[in-house]
Amino acid sequence: MDVVVVQELLGHVTPAFTQATYQHVRPRLKREAADKIGTALWPNDS
């Protein structure tokens, strides 16, 4: 999702504030997405 859209939805004054506040979420979301793709491509791997 675009940071400006999130900024506007949350009522933050600047996109920079939104990014600084929520930047820790992105690595977790990337990991979760990679795990889901891996499961879809290699469902029998543990």
Image (spheres, rainbow, N blue to C red):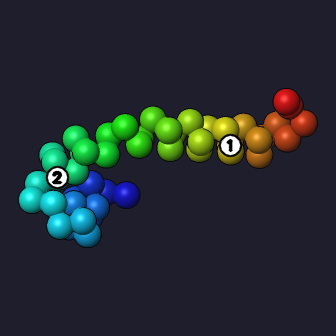
N-term mark: 2 or 1: 2
Badge 1, how many Cα within 10 Å: few under 14, some, many 20+? few
> As drawn, is 45 to the left or to the right of 11?
right
> As drawn, is 13 to the left or to the right of 41?
left
Rendering coords of residue 23 (x, y %): 32, 40
Rendering coords of residue 20 (x, y %): 22, 41
User: From mark 2 to mark 1, how far is it between C-alphas?
Assistant: 29 Å
In front: label 2 or label 1: 2
Residue with the most extreme top position: 46
> As drawn, is 28 to the left or to the right of 16?
right
Q: Residue placed at 85% from the left, 41% from the top?
A: 43
Numbered disc 2: secondary structure: helix
Residue with the most extreme left position: 13
Type of amino acid under label 2: Pro
Q: Residue placed at 15% from the left, 46% from the top?
A: 16
Residue 22's place in the image compared with 31, above or below, is: below
> As drawn, is 38 to the left or to the right of 18?
right
Q: Are marks 2 and 1 in contact (CB under 8 Å)?
A: no
Q: Residue placed at 85% from the left, 30% from the top?
A: 46
Which picture quadrant has residue 4?
bottom left
Residue with the most extreme right position: 44
Which picture quadrant has residue 36?
top right
Type of amino acid under label 1: Ile
Q: Which image quadrant: the N terminus?
A: bottom left
Numbered disc 1: secondary structure: helix
- Residue at image mark 2: 15
Rendering coords of residue 21 (x, y %): 25, 45
- Residue at image mark 1: 37
Residue 41's place in the image compared with 45, above or below, is: below
Badge 2, how many Cα within 10 Å: few under 14, some, many 20+? some
